[in-house]
Every structure is written in C-alpha cells, then in structure tokens.
Image (cartoon, rainbow, N blue to C red):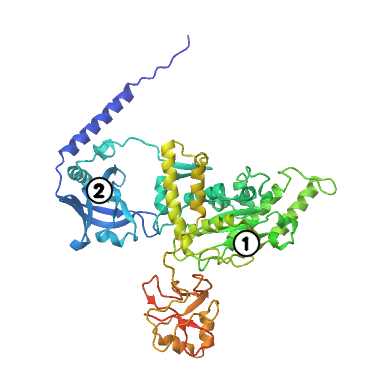
Amino acid sequence: MEASIVVDSDDEAERCAEAEARAAAAAHALAAEPPQECFCCRLALPPSRGLLTPQPVGEVQIWRQDQALIFSPEDAEEDDDLVIPVAGISSVDVKADGPMIILTLSPPLAANGFAVDYMAEGHRIATVTLSPLTEELRSALATLMAWLQHLTLHGPKALGLVPRPLQEPVALRLHGTVLEERDLDLLEDEQWFNDTIMDFFMRLALEVAAPQQLQDELYVAKTQFFTRLTACGASSGEKGWENVKTWTRTVNGGVASQRVLVYPVNEANLHWCVFFVCHPHGAIQQTEADEDVPRIVCLDSAWEPVPKDDHIKLLKGYLRRELFNNPLGGNGAAVLGADGSVAAASVARWKAAVMGLEKMQAIDGDVPKQQNVYDCGLYVLEFLLYLLRQPGQFSRLGLESHQEWFDQSVITHRRTQMRELVSRLLSEGKRSGQMDVSLLLRDESLRNAVREALTSEPPEPENPEPENPEPENPEENVPWRPPAEPAHWSAMSAMSAAGGAEGVWGAWGWSYEWEHVAKREVSPTWPFGVGRDRGRSSWQFGHVESPGGNEFSAARPLAGADCGVMVLEHV
C-alpha cells in the first residue's frame, strides 16, 4: 500500500483565527479612540511645476470648521490656510508604511491658500497626503472618521480598517506598452513625459499617421534602447548589441532593410532628444546620392544641447554589429565570398561595416527650440509627427534648416489634444470592455479622431495681430519701424557694428554678458531673434516677460546704426 500524506490544516486555521481576532481588537480600539478637535501631521501636495513626485509642504495643523477641513502651516497667516470642503473628499485610503493617509478630492480642487505657491497655474489638487507620527496614527484616524462620516476609511485590518476591494488598474495597451490612468497626470501642463507616454504615442503615431509604405520602411526603437544597450557592463555598442539583438527580430528584412531608424533618448532622466538614422545600409554600400546619404541626425529642442558623442559612438557600434550579423537579404545566413569561403565573406562584410559606420556623418539638426524646460518630450513626438505628415522631408533631414516646421503654439495644442485623446480612448475601452488600442482603432470614426488629434494644427486666433504692430510706449522722436528685411540678428555683431555700442547698450539700464544669440523666427511677421544670457534665460525681440519676471518693451532700431540693429529696452 502506498503511503499517503495528510496535510493538517489546523495550524493555518488557527493563524487565520488569530489574525481575525487581532483585526477585531484593532477595530474595537479605533472605535473607542476619542476624536480630537485638531491634529498635526506632515502634508504633501500632488506633483506640479514639472515635478514627478509629491511636493512636501511640512508640518500642518488640521481642524474642521463648518463644512470644510482647514490646513494651516506653522506660523502661517489666516489667509494662507488651505481650505478643502468636506463634500469634496471622495475617498480616504490609509497605508501602514509611512504611515500615510491619502485624501482623494473629486472634482479636483482649485489651489487656494498656501497651495497656490506649489501648484502651477491651472493645475488642481486631486489628492493630499497626510503623514502623522506612528504613535499618533490611531488618534488621527479616529478624528477623520468623526469628521468624514459619509466615507469609509479603507486600509489594513491591522489598523482596524476595512481593506479596499482589489481592482485591476484600468490601462490601455498598444504593442506591448501599457498606459494607465495615472499617466494622464503627465499630460497636464508643465509636466515632463515619462517613457510610457513616449513609447505609447510614438507607436500610436505610426499606427494612424504614417502612410502604409512608410510604415514598412520606418523602425522606431523603444525608449529603453540605450539603457538596455549599456546594461551588464557593456562598454561599447558592439558589446551592447548582445543585449538588444532580439529587438528587431520582428522587423521584416531587419534593420538593413529600413529606410529610417528612430531612437528616442532620455538624457540623465532630465531631457528627451531623438536620433534618426537615415539609410543605414547605405553606410556599407558607400552611397553617393545626396538624398540617400547615410547619416545620423540628432534632433534636440534644447537651446544648448549637451554633446552627443557618447550616444553616437554607442549607436554606430550597435549598427556595425547589426549590419554585419544581419546583412540586407542575408537574414543572418552565411554568404560566400569571391573565393567561395564563408570566412572571406565575413571578413569583407565586417570591414565594410567598420569603415562605413566610421565614415557615417553625425549631424545636429537645426530644429525649433522649446520655450520652457518641460516640453522636450513633446518636441520629440512632434518631430516624428511632422515627418510622418511630410514624408518627403526625410530625404533632406539634417541637410537644411528645419526651423519652419512648427512653433510653440503647435506644441501647446498637441498636449491638449493628447490629453483629450487618452481620455476618449479610456472611455471607449471601459464602454466596450476592450483596452487593446489596436482593436479599438478598427472603429473607423475613432481612428479618424485619433489621427486628427495627432496631426491637426492649432486654430487661427480670432483677432490676429497687425503685420506692423506699434510698440506700447514708443519713445518720443524715435519712429517705430520693422526690420528692413526678414533677417536674424546677432547681438554681438550688433554691438560691434553700431560703434561705441557698449555705452548705448548700457544707457538703457540693462546689460548682460551675451553668450550667443540663437536664430529663430518667433512668428511669420516678426522674424526677430531670441537672446540668451549666461543665466540661460531668454527673451524674444518683442514685448515679452522673461522667466525671471523682467519685462522688456518691443525691440527698436539702435540710434546711429544704419544696419537695422535691434536692442531691448528694459521697462
């Protein structure tokens, strides 16, 4: 007779009974805890102003006054208190780690009191996080239960609370990228994009905005490409190829068959830029035609981009291995050389890959520059979207100026469209029970709406400015006139051309040591430059307010100069 093993479940049942007893005791203790008139704890507000993590405020005192909770920092005046209506608090979640008490506000609350200093204009407060001391947690919970009797506080049973039922997060899926509802926060104004946002929208752009032929000739790598390429201590692109060699196995014909390769880059988790590799296979064929010249083009919206030498070296090393191991038409199979040997063919192919990639040009594209510190990801997406709308531009990519592609108004418009687009996709997914975006896009009307959101231009202003605007406060006896011709102006050449310009420059009560002037047309009718000082602030040659709050009047001709030199007058 075979021996049988009997598992005695008495121990497990006993453990469960003990846990239930502890939970009941904790609930009884919480119910017996008297509520306080007020309590103190640390407070954090949601991310804003480009931050990705909650913003710590510090110690606050909290009490209920009529139908609102009042949050008052130490030594704050009454007008600085944050006021949250009780009816606006939709849920309370408690986490033992910390501990933390998270109040969710629905609808999100407009910032008031001291919160105005933490939230960007237009941003609302969706949650507030309270962090009481561990020994004061029960008292704080009892007080909140007394104040918020219309709600159930959800949290661990060990604290005497009711656990929240488990729910799978609602998420959109597209070609392996998962976009959750919480990612919507990063589409708000003044927020940086994370890798999920970038991957999702680059793939969505290819899905709906790229012509069919271009879809077969364009490969877009995931944002983690360079991170994986340098993983496991890989010190070169050739060695790093082993880490990512399977990434292109689903690409028909491999990398060598692609007309353009796209590699988005996150530099130090602070800034997005993108590399376009044009005609990679031509590098080992030594193509001579101008429009087919193999090249790596970096498109970076930063005013002063950091050097890209390391990234270019890694990318060339990767391409060297990729083109060698997966030659055009070879699919990785052995190819015979002139003498009939595989070895001779491999040596020749490796030599061609080494020499070709070494000679491949690396170009910094002359592209529109961002007007703030947080829109870099949007610029990368818009670079791709513009090229998908104008595929003929690929042949001249990096070989001429691209400053006229778009301006900041398009970027602002696109962010709004993307935010509304994700909301609609989530609504459609919840309604249909289908969260795979590729399947949702089978609905032609939805597909058209997505395409429109990713390709539309901002509406024209209702009251456009006149072609030759007058300055608000023109100086007496100095007639206003636009530049004689639509040229870009150099501050340094302006000072030298004017003769004694330093004295005149200083006469306006405003003097900076100019590092350089970046060329940019800020509007079709005002082709003035944008100046940047060593503090990396910027001003347009027009009536603007600088990031530091300094206001400058419209540019005007410098007295005594016959070359149309422009200066800024400090208001």
Which residue reaches farthest top? 1
The residue lying toward the viewer, choosing from 86 and 144, is 86
Q: What percent of the width, then of the height, locates residue 63?
A: 17, 52
- Mark 2 belongs to which amino acid? Gly
Pointer 1 residue: 397
**Discs 2, 1 touching: Cβ within 8 Å:** no
Q: Which residue is mark 2?
A: 88
Give the class, few, some or many, for how many residues have Cα within 10 Å of label 1's Cα (few <14, many ≥20). Answer: many
Local secondary structure at mark 1: loop
Looking at the image, residue 251 sits to the left or right of residue 304; the answer is right
Q: Residue at x 65, y 55 (%)?
A: 317
Of the residues shown, which amino acid type is indicated by label 1?
Leu
Q: Residue at x 43, y 45 (%)?
A: 424
Q: Nearer the viewer, residue 513 or 67?
A: 67
Kindly identify the residue that appears in the image at 39 percent across and 85 percent down: 475
- Point out residue 484 in the picture as x, y percentages from the top left corner: 53, 81
Mark identifier at residue 522: none
The secondary element bearing badge 2 is classed as helix
| Neighbourhood count class around disc 2 (C-alpha, 10 Å): few under 14, some 14–19, many 20 upward | some
Q: Quadrant of residue 312?
A: bottom right
Q: Residue 527, can we see it?
A: yes
Q: Residue at x 81, y 48 (%)?
A: 337
Q: Nearer the viewer, residue 429 or 41?
A: 429
Q: Quadrant of residue 112?
A: bottom left
**Image quadrant containing the C terminus:** bottom left
- Label located before the other in sequence (2 or 1): 2
Q: Position of residue 200 (x, y in %)?
A: 50, 48
Q: CA distance from mark 2 to mark 1?
A: 52 Å
In this rendering, the answer to whether 22 lies above or below 377 is above
- In this rendering, position of residue 253 left or right of residue 556: right
- Location of residue 393 (image quadrant): bottom right
